[in-house]
Image: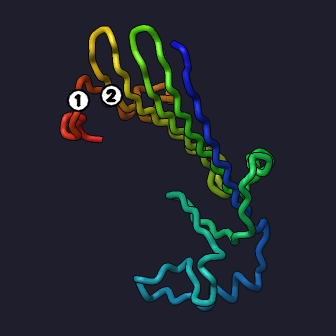
């Protein structure tokens, strides 16, 4: 197939956090927490600006990280990819228009890769949406596929032929 047009957009995002904390600050905040109130989160304190602290949690642990700065360049993303006190995220969108003798296709690829602060693993997701028109059979094809990068069976896959209404596409 001949690629008529290809558009690729990338968004790099990095958040840096403080790599140390003060024991005086920790104990002064801990003393102000009221544990008897069930609606109050024991990890939040009254005198802390909530915009300065971001919470990342896992089932086994809860961390508190004090926000330092935002960065939006590819260079900063690559430099901090292995930094445990940085949150890094890459979002990529690719739009491809292809044509052959038999058909014309429009494909939209979405790629998302993120690692939270203090974590060692990345969360990755991929999505593909496509529409194809076949000249020989005079048929229109539409489909979705999510998490196609995984080796096991693809999580979400949907395909329809000659479907021109929202109801005929099925659940999304």
Q: Secondary structure at mark 2?
A: strand
Q: Is 155 on the left or on the right of 95, as rendered?
A: left
Measure the C-alpha gap from mark 1 to mark 2.
8 Å
The one of 19 and 110 positioned closer to us in this rendering: 110
The one of 43 and 5 positioned closer to us in this rendering: 5
Q: How many marks?
A: 2
Residue at 37% x, 32% y: name it: 144
Can you give x and y, in whole percent of width and height, for residue 22 in the image? 78, 79
For label 1, the crowd category at 10 Å Cα-Cα, with few meaning under 14, some 14 to 19 and many 20 or more, is some
The quadrant the C terminus occupies is top left
Location of residue 31 (image quadrant): bottom right
Location of residue 5 (image quadrant): top right
Q: Secondary structure at mark 1?
A: loop
Residue at 56% x, 77% y: name it: 43
Can you give x and y, in whole percent of width and height, for residue 85 in the image? 73, 59
Instruction: Tell me if label 1 and label 2 are in contact, CB under 8 Å.
Output: yes
**Chain-order first, disc 1 or disc 2:** 2
Can you give x and y, in whole percent of width and height, for residue 165 in the image? 21, 37
Residue at 69% x, 72% y: name it: 66
Residue ID for mark 1? 163
Residue ID for mark 2? 142
Residue at 56% x, 87% y: name it: 33
Q: Is residue 56 positioned above or below 5 on the image?
A: below
The one of 4 and 120 positioned closer to us in this rendering: 4
Q: Which mark is drawn over residue 136?
A: none
């Amino acid at each position: 197939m001949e690629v008529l047009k290809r558009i690729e957009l990338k968004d790099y995002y990095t958040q840096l956090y403080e790599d140390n904390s003060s024991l005086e600050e920790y104990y002064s905040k801990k003393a102000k927490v009221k544990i008897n109130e069930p609606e109050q989160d024991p990890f939040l304190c009254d005198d802390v600006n909530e915009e300065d602290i971001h919470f990342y949690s896992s089932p086994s642990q809860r961390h508190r990280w004090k926000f330092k700065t935002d960065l939006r360049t590819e260079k900063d993303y690559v430099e901090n990819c292995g930094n445990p006190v940085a949150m890094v995220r890459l979002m990529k969108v690719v739009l491809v228009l292809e044509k052959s003798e038999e058909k014309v296709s429009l494909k939209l690829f979405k790629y998302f890769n993120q690692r939270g602060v203090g974590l060692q693993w990345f969360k990755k997701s991929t999505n593909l949406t496509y529409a194809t028109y076949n000249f020989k059979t005079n048929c229109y094809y539409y489909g979705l596929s999510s998490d196609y990068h995984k080796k096991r069976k693809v999580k979400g896959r949907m395909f329809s032929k000659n479907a021109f209404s929202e109801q005929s596409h099925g659940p999304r």
